[in-house]
Amino acid sequence: MSLFTQMIQLQMQILLMLSIGFFLRKQKIVTPEIRKGLSTLLINVVLPCTVIISFMNDSVVNSDLLMTCFIAVLISAIIQTVSIIASKFLFQKYEKTDANVLRYGMIVSNSAFIGIPIIQSIYGSGAVMFTSVFQIPIIVTMWTIGLALFKPIDHRHALKSVIKNPSVVAVMIGFVIMLTGIKFPLFITKTISSIASCTTAISMFVVGSILAEIEWNNLFEKKVLFYCAIRLIIYPFLVFIALTFLNVPT
């Protein structure tokens, strides 16, 4: 099956799961309380299991693997830095409250919540390892500059929040497992893998239930369309061009 066919199949699968989440919310089967519980479960249990299992794929630990992880972190850090700087200028014409929300959306992506399930579906568990490492600068940004957009921050508390973030903890655990070559009993591996397999469904149900509550008229406001054009089209395209020009290994 070609990559294009895989993408079409995946998009249809995601659309169907989003529709189910949308329907469940409209029927009040998924309430805000249930959605909050699902989100908490996803962030604290399911996604970490997805990350950990990606480090248990029997990859040979060598300089190439570690260099790829370093490149992933470096690229992510550069993207975050550019996003932070660009967001100051792109949204300065809006009121402070709106500008801060737009800036937060610019510098803190949902690449874990949505990205990991998609990467897992297309490239398999092994690719999730690099995606997870890529998340680290985003998480750091979220708990520092991102949080500071809305309230004063305690840098010590922010550091603790980064270190205690479930995805960061999962990456640390994953590296320990990979570097030490620890082999777990099959029932443990199967349990982690089974939990990880729920990632896409739960995340799409949550997003679908959120979409069911959106005021659709607001989606066509100029500031929303401007933000979407920048964040979803122009910026990813520029990153793609830059990475292609720099011949970053795929």
Image (tube, grey):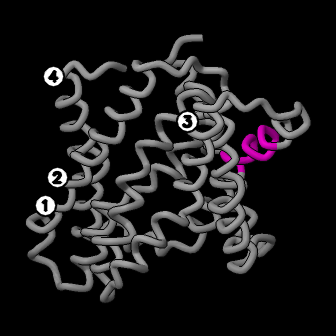
Q: Can you give x and y, in whole percent of width and height, for residue 211 in the image? A: 56, 65
**Furthest-front residue in this view:** 180
The residue carrying pointer 4 sits among few (fewer than 14), some (14 to 19) or many (20 or more) residues within 10 Å by Cα, namely: few
Q: Which residue is mark 4?
A: 245
- The vertical placement of 67 against 147, above or below, is above
Sooner in the amino-acid sequence: mark 4 or mark 2: 2
Q: CA distance from mark 3 to mark 4?
A: 24 Å
Q: Can you give x and y, in whole percent of width and height, for residue 138 in the image? A: 37, 56
Dot 4 amino acid type: Phe
Q: CA distance from mark 1 to mark 2?
A: 5 Å
Residue 164, picture quadrant: bottom right
Q: CA distance from mark 2 to mark 3?
A: 24 Å
Q: Nearer the viewer, residue 141 or 157?
A: 157
Q: Which residue is mark 2?
A: 82
Q: Is residue 168 magenta?
A: no
Sooner in the amino-acid sequence: mark 3 or mark 4: 3
Which element carries disc 3, helix, strand or loop? helix
Residue 97, picture quadrant: bottom left
Dot 3 amino acid type: Val
